[in-house]
Image (cartoon, helix red, strand yellow):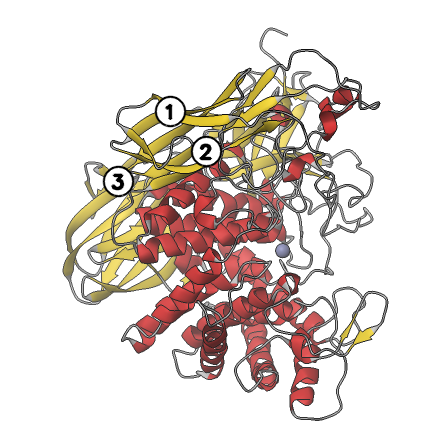
Amino acid sequence: MDEKTANRGMSRRELLEAVGKAAAVSAALPPLIESALGSSGTVAAQAAPLTSVAGVDRIVMLQGKTYLNGWAGYGRPPARDWERERGAPVPPSPPVPGPAPTAAWSKDSGPGAVTFADANRLVTTATFSAPGAYVLRLTVDNGESKASSTLNVVVETPPPPTPLDGVHTRKYRIDSPLWSNRAKALMVSWIPHCIDQINRTDLQQGPGGIDNFVEAGKALAGQPHGNHKGYVFSNAWVHQTVEAMSIALVIDPRGDPDIIRAHEKMRATLEDWIPKILSAQEPDGYLQTAFTLPRVNARGVVDPGPFERWTRRGDHEGYTAGYFIESAINHYVMTGGKDARLYSAARKLADCWCNNIGPAPKRTWYDGHQEMEQALVRFGRFVNETEGGGKGQKYIQLAKFLLDSRANGSEYDQSYLPVVQQYEAVGHAVRAVYTYSGMADIAAETGDVDYQSAVMSIWDNLVNRKYYVTGGVGSGETSEGFGPDYSLRNNAYCESCSSCGEIFFQWKMNLLYHDARYADLYEETLYNALLGATDLEGRNFYYTNPLDANAPRTSWHNCPCCVGNIPRTLLMLPTWMYARAADGIYVNLFIGSTVTVENVAGTDVQMVQATDYPWNGKMSITVNPKTPGRFGIRIRVPNRNVSRLYVGAPDSSGIASVAVNGSAVKLEIDRGYCVITRDWKAGDRIDLVLPLKVQRVRATEKIAADRGRVALRYGPLVYNIEKVDQDITQALGPASALTTEWRGDLLGGVTVVKGTFADGSPLTAIPNFARYNRNPAEAPKPQSPYGAGAGGRPAPRPPTSIVWIKEQSPGT
Ligand SMILES: [Zn+2]
């Protein structure tokens, strides 16, 4: 029986509760007592038992403050998103008699002094005099009884004052058996498929491609025109595919005729689409065809509009605008700045937003679905770089304004509190990680300590309580979103877009903190949550990526997302591989490739990685500076156990050896990087070996879904077992040996992990990214974009491909 059912049978009790958590509840919300009411509503005379709820832990920067949003009341505290049925309103709260309690904040423990702005107010702030771990206490007292709860706060020193610079994805070459094949599938199959779908005007599922721009162009020219098709944000199909094409076109085809043919198609498509997109831009720069064309609702009724801009939170204006701006950046980079059509249009669009949104007398606004925030920061930096004179700053300021405007809303879209008072990953997972990615941008751009504290707290909550071993996020216990701490069911939601956003977020944390652990995390997400979003042939994709899989990928979707986000993110390898500081280069990923990192210590440096990683841990990096010079190269020392939720054994972190031009180098580690500072000249070579071992990964006992189970990992790759190879309900013996074997014939060439189940039958595990590529006979089951909530998913059926394998307990 669940708690709710149990409470219904009780007579009425008055529960005085104190909740010392900021992120969890707003003081403005009324207390909920529905579940404490008996069916008869009679009041029992029994004494009220006191209950307290632990706070959500958080991190605060030493110079900053932490926002305390305590809650005290009778009955249950306000319900969190995951405690309600999907879409259900907050139950009404009848007035509860009882004396108003007084509140008092105090310090239980901690190395320094704590100063409360007002220790007797539930909603207040605290500052700290020294770094370290603190416990704060909130006590409430109604004259008859007391209740209290505690909150753990860790005080840290802020990140370095100057963030690292991101590296643009310009012309580069991939020489990696794994990545060459993956990139080729995206370029010759997936992106051309997206182009064809977007060009179609007859799609029943997922309509509204380039035709929306054509019709909007006609409308703006005063000509007869059609209605808007598809979701209000269907423009995202087009923008993301433009960006994916722009990135694909900077990848050296290495003479491959298939890739050359695909590139030709992309170039022709851009020439066809760009004038159509531009024709739909309104004279003042606004661009969103659902606001320009009449719309048809679900019942087929036409609403001619006009639709007032920036009044409809659910209409994704910022979402589509942001993707347009990002596509323009990559298009401009791809053409080497020679074709500024999209860039200029993006400038116009961003200016239109700047002219209308901002402090009074302009409009206060935030979009229900984030994306504009991180796009505006990216654009602001890019404009600063290309045009100078701080011309991009206004876009960064607007991004901060959009984030700061979030308030008085819901957990679902991260507007339940001002973002700087949020310390927990909540709500719709894509919206969430896009918010956090934008917040990390603002923390880096402004040095705002409230942003830094919130970002680090959310990061800690996400990575150490709400993170899958695949690097995916979003359990689906709220609508497409996060559940409570440690609640990580394996029929997870893990939308492909949330994997993209998770990579963006961790990458920005890497730039902010100059720390390799964030790159460890995005490598994990890249290989295990995102790389397998499309099948090996690049013909079908996953909208959601549960760890217990039982459905094949599908070729298209109703929802205009994921399909373009997957290739644009996967193909931006130089950006994920390297970062740049004034005094050197950071090597974040190990992928056979040739990439030029520009403007390092006064020169451009071509970096040539030769490696078969992740199949082999050996690699060499040839460093070719245009002119010889002294700078540092920092090579990420992999840490496979960044999230405290999972531990892999045996240990497979670290670098086994490193040498420069054949001479061993003493490992000097700083923030997770091996630092080699010297005079570099063209042809200098770094050789290194990363240890690759098959690991058994076990989850903390707090994750109920993974108890008695083990995941297998080899280097950065998480493995899974499929029904097509074995009975996946079997248990692995705790001591059975696990080995690897290269199988060139299997799944395009993969290293498999081999072992034996407890009953002696063989186990074969494949990399998770290659899952579900051998079940063509199975009928596709449509995936619901609203899957996780009540009524959203088809009836569950047993998984046929799993990450967490049963493990026989020792001694049985
Ligand atoms: Zn998506």
Seen at 35% across and 61% down, the residue is: 167
- Residues under labels 3 and 2: Cα distance? 26 Å
Question: At which x and y percent is residue 149?
Answer: 49, 23
**In the rendering, which numbered label is found on residue 643?**
2
The amino acid marked with disc number 1 is Ser
The amino acid marked with disc number 3 is Val
Question: At which x and y percent is residue 447?
Answer: 30, 53
Q: Are marks 2 and 1 in contact (CB under 8 Å)?
A: no
Sequence-first tag of 1 and 3: 1
Does residue 747 lie above or below 24 as drawn?
A: below
Q: Which residue is mark 1?
A: 106
Question: At which x and y percent is residue 563?
Answer: 63, 60
Left or right: residue 456 versus residue 470 is left
Helix, strand or loop at label 3? It is strand
In the displayed orientation, state which residue is furthest to the top.
811
Q: Are marks 1 and 3 in contact (CB under 8 Å)?
A: no
Seen at 39% across and 78% down, the residue is: 336
Sequence-first tag of 3 and 2: 2
- Residues under labels 2 and 1: Cα distance? 31 Å
Q: Which residue is mark 3?
A: 658
Helix, strand or loop at label 2? It is loop
Q: Is mark 2 within 8 Å of ligand 1?
A: no
Sequence-first tag of 2 and 1: 1
Quarter containing the C terminus: top right
Q: Nearer the viewer, mark 2 or mark 1?
A: 1
Q: Quadrant of residue 728?
A: top right
Does residue 35 lie above or below 796 as drawn?
A: above
For disc 1, the neighbor class at 10 Å (few under 14, some 14 to 19, many from 20) is some
Q: Nearer the viewer, mark 1 or mark 3?
A: 1
Q: Quadrant of residue 616?
A: top left
